[in-house]
Image (cartoon, helix red, strand yellow):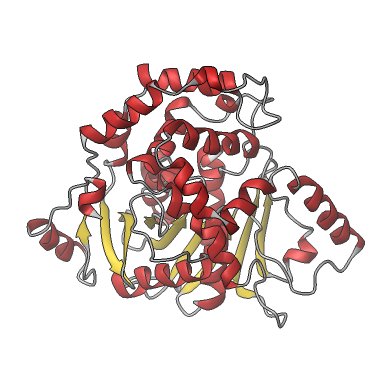
Amino acid sequence: MEALLGFSRTKGQDQRQISQMEPTMTDIRRFTIDVPETKLRRIREHVAAYPWADMPALDGWEYGTNHAYLRALCNYWLDGFDWRREEAAMSSFDHFITPIDGIDIHFILEKGSGPNPRPLILSHGWPGSVDEFRHIIQPLAHPERFGGDIADAFDVVAPSLPGFGFSGAPPQPIGPRKMAALFNTLMTERLGYTGYLAQGGDWGGAISSWLGYDHAQACAAIHLNIFTMRHHAGPQTPDEDKWAAAFEVQQASQNGYRVQQATKPQSLGFAMADSPVGVAAWIIEKFNAWSDTSGDDVESAHTKDALLANIMIYLVTNSFATASWIYAGRETEGGRLISTDGSRVEVPTACALFPKELLAWPPQSYANRVYNITRWTEFPRGGHFAAMEAPELLIEDIRAFARALPPRVSAN
């Protein structure tokens, strides 16, 4: 993986520094993002050579990514975007790699302020990346630097999902349940935490759910900004029936990508392997459709730099294809059902409801049969990418949830 991606990973002295920082951190090495200039040049050449004249110039977003917007974004990609600036911002955090079950798991570790920071693992989803958390890691770890209380500090662990970004890929598709097992090993065996909290949106919400269900001995509580799991008995009230029917209607125009990635991700991967513009179109359409935008102005929710930094992570790591595997992996694990016997996630669960979330939340009566919900918060704004769209709301909700929990989470 190291030679393939062109990233440098230092050992020796850095490994000793890791050991001094946390004695239980074994089999972990530092990781440095340093994309070769040759790879950046190849990406630029592909973007510059894209045959725009061969694509129908459909207006709007009804049939997919807006032609005019994508072309303007690509012009900025060539003339205004600076990967090295984004790379430097990402590198302001401490990055590490550790092998778990034969997969190199990349993660950011930001040790929290004060004597008793709570361990917290943040899990991203698709088509996002660990860079989604760029603006919440420091406030969560060091609240006193942002006008908050040092007692709210967390040790923040933010991994790249297996197959995504800077992590290695499994040999075949795996789903969120297996990823949860890998992340529990990361938190307990690699980092030595006897207890921790988990937070996630998109696939991170499913991973956090499985952490709370399968690994409750270590995962003390979960915070979700998406509802992805289902109860085996289905809706039980008129309100729940109404939600389920509306959900199917809402998802009808969004299911194409999901079905493709759940059934034939390899075919899609071949198509995207040498097309940076294709990858951008596939991803940008989701950021526009799933975010709390003003009309169809994706930049009312996200800057060009933020959008392109996320896209570039897929490109510089050659991970578009393997990131798509998670959809197929979930199917092999049994889909969305949390159980077939009516058991639920019993650890305390916080639900953060952002109004433009793509996957509409059910009535709380339904959610209560899937989770032990102790906090239910409805927000006035924000969408699917909560850490990017409404970071201050997400941060405060995580803090408030953690304050109400018993102090059982700690490091060895």
Question: Up-down: is 237 above or below 286?
Answer: below
Residue 101 falls left or right of residue 54? left
Counting from the top left corner in percent of width and height, residue 142 is at 36, 48
- When the figure is inspected, residue 153 is found, relative to residue 404, above or below; the finding is above
To which quarter of the image does residue 59 belong? top right
- Give the residue at the far right of this rendering: 238
How far across and down, in percent of the image, does residue 234 sit? 80, 69
Residue 17 or 268: which is nearer the viewer?
Answer: 268
Location of residue 292 (image quadrant) = top right
Q: How many tags in the picture?
A: 0
Closer-to-camera residue (60/379): 60
Quadrant for the N terminus in the image = bottom left
Q: Residue furthest front?
A: 54
- Horizontally, residue 29 falls left or right of residue 312, namely left
Spot the residue most to the bottom.
341
Q: Would residue 267 be seen by someone viewing this image from the given angle?
A: yes
- Residue at 46% over, 53% down: 323
Residue 375, above or below 7: below
Q: Residue at x 51, y 39 (%)?
A: 388
Which quarter of the rendered picture does the C terminus lie within?
bottom left
Residue at (48, 37) in percent of width and height:
279
Q: Is residue 84 above or below residue 198?
A: above
Quarter of the figure with residue 172: bottom left
Between residue 96 and residue 172, name the one nearer to us. Answer: 172
Q: In the rendered image, is residue 125 in sight?
A: no
Q: Residue at x 59, y 34 (%)?
A: 285
Q: Is residue 25 found left or right of 402 in the rendered image?
A: left
286 or 193, which lies in front?
A: 286
- Where in the figure is residue 89, as x and y percent of width and height? 31, 36
Residue 54: x and y in percent read 54, 21
